[in-house]
Amino acid sequence: MTAPVRPIVILLVEDDPGDELMTLEAFADNTHDSTVHVVRDGEQALDFLFRRGEYSQAPRPDLVLLDLNLPKYSGRQVLARIRAEEDLADLPVIILTTSSSEDDIMSSYRLFANAYVTKPVDLDQFTDAINQIDTFFTRTVRLPSRT
């Protein structure tokens, strides 16, 4: 049995404008009506998640797509903070990065990333990867309720 389809709130943490655009276009092509919020560095990601400053009214995301190589705080540092915070520890986090380094993969899973996806260089493959992530999280899995 599949989970009911519902729009989800996604936090995209991405500092590369080209990758941001491709990701947003891939989500726009889907029919799941997911809402994607974008922040461009690790500090903004933490402010969004902890609802600080300009993000004081931010919704709690259902899913985080997290790049590893970010300004201010790395994706690893952001992931470690998410997992250390009781209110965020159950938040699904997918590492979405250009790195295919085995060290990056292992360190991400040791910090309890839910998945590790290396960004495909090809636009069609990139779009397909985003569509699979969106479909999986809107149709297949049960996500914790937002509070």
Image: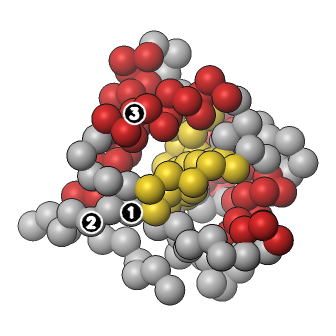
- Amino acid residing under circle 3: Ala
The secondary element bearing badge 3 is classed as helix
Helix, strand or loop at label 2? It is loop
**Residue 68: horizontal and vertical position, in percent?**
71, 41
Expressed as whole percent of the image width and height from the top left, the position of residue 141 reads 29, 64
Q: Residue at x 29, y 58 (%)?
A: 138
**Mark toward the start of the polypeptide (3 vs 1):** 1
Q: Which mark is residue 6?
A: 2
> Quick check: can you spot residue 95?
yes
**Callout 1 touching callout 2 (CB < 8 Å):** yes
Residue 89, given in percent of the width and then of the height, sits at 61, 76
Which kind of residue does numbered mark 2 sit on? Arg
What's the residue at 79%, 41% (across, down)? 70
Q: Nearer the viewer, residue 67 or 57?
A: 57
**Residue drawn 19% across and 68% down?**
3
Q: Secondary structure at mark 1?
A: loop
Residue indicated by mark 1 = 8
The residues bearing labels 2 and 3 have C-alpha atoms spaced at a distance of 18 Å
Q: Is residue 132 above or below residue 43?
A: above
Query: Which residue is label 3 attached to?
Result: 26
Image spot of residue 143 (x, y percent): 37, 72
Return the residue found at the far right.
72
